[in-house]
Image: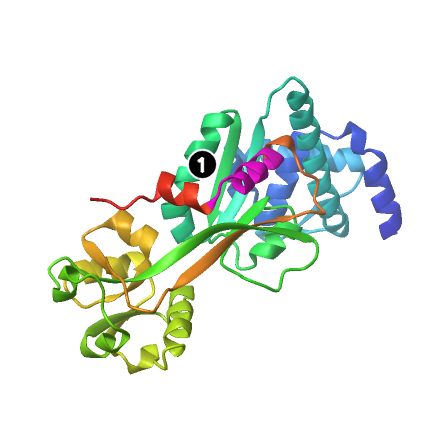
Amino acid sequence: MKTNRISKISSDKSMLDAHQVNIFLVAAETLNFTQAAERLHMSQPSVSQHIKALEKHFGEVLFIRQGRSLILSDAGRVLIPLARQFIIQSTNINETMSSLRGQIKGRIRIGCNAESGKYILPEFFKQFYSHHPEVTIVCETDSCSSPLEALRRGKQHFIITNQEKGFDPCFDVHHFLTEEINLITPRNHPWAERNSIEVEDLLNEKFILPATNTNTYQKVNAALASKNLSLLQLDSYLTLSLSEAIILSVAKGLGVSFSSKIISTTIGNVVSIPINGLIINRDLSIVRDKTQLSTAAQDAFWDFIAAVSDEIKQSAAFSEKS
């Protein structure tokens, strides 16, 4: 029965309306026609009509009402992966045909954490847009608890991540950026007048620590371990999860802390202090699923990122503020 339904759906694929299939996917994700209509900027009756038309096309019920709730029917569940591939293929056809005329256009979806989305990526989007103004970028921050799974499902075309290993062979991974993590102090702090401090000096100051589950905490703690020191040995009375909160608290004189140089330079009102013999870096990577169909726009973005060296990135986007 299930095999027959797959064959039926696949055999009529060429006659499908990509717009209707996309409406189905959004409705399947929300399981709510009203929410789907809001996301698609349509009316709820219009969404319902398109779903009915699709059900008529297949001769199958795609959604089952249970009181005020919707659930997917067996046919609806079968349709989801096929519909995703159909949308990808349809998009790929349109964008590839445009590229034959020397045009690179289309939409790319990028997943990243909030810090990268606010402080790192905008400059790259600006540079990319200057070369490819007909490409639309959708950047989603912290929209998925499993970003690699979002790549596999085709919901994202790229993710920016600080994960360093453990990638499956199906993923292409390219180094994107090396980010410095620095000790930061208020501008009026005694250390702000010094060219550098010693590691031992850290034991004589009040600290605002990043939360233990953050990448900043893990990177700083690992670096301190090489000097036989730990963040737990520092005199701390405040722990914060958000980088912005840490930097603003340091700027107000509540203590000293560690922060990404890019973010602290952007927000300002703090001073970065080198620690002799201690360099703390973290690498960001851009990842894509090489088993997914790739459009000209996606290839253009991947090639753009691969062509930009760390030196150019740092000097173009994150020069130190005076």
At x 46% / y 54%, what residue is drawn? 142
Q: Helix, strand or loop at disc 1?
A: helix
Residue pushed farthest top?
101
Q: Check the image and report above or below for 224 versus 93.
A: below
How far across and down, in percent of the image, does residue 33 sit? 57, 42
Name the residue rendered at 29%, 56% in the picture: 244
Up-down relation of residue 173 to residue 227 (above or below): above
Q: Main secondary structure of the magenta part?
A: helix
Bounds of the magenta span?
A: 298-309
Q: Is residue 31 visible?
A: no
The question of residue 91 being in magenta is answered with: no
Residue 270 seen in render: yes
Mark 1 belongs to which amino acid? Phe
The residue singled out by tag 1 in the image is 125
Left or right side of 202 for 94:
right
Task: Answer left or right for 151 relative to 129.
Answer: right
Judge left or right: residue 1 versus residue 308. Answer: right
Which of the 4 image quarters holds residue 281? bottom left
Above/below status of 121 relative to 165: above
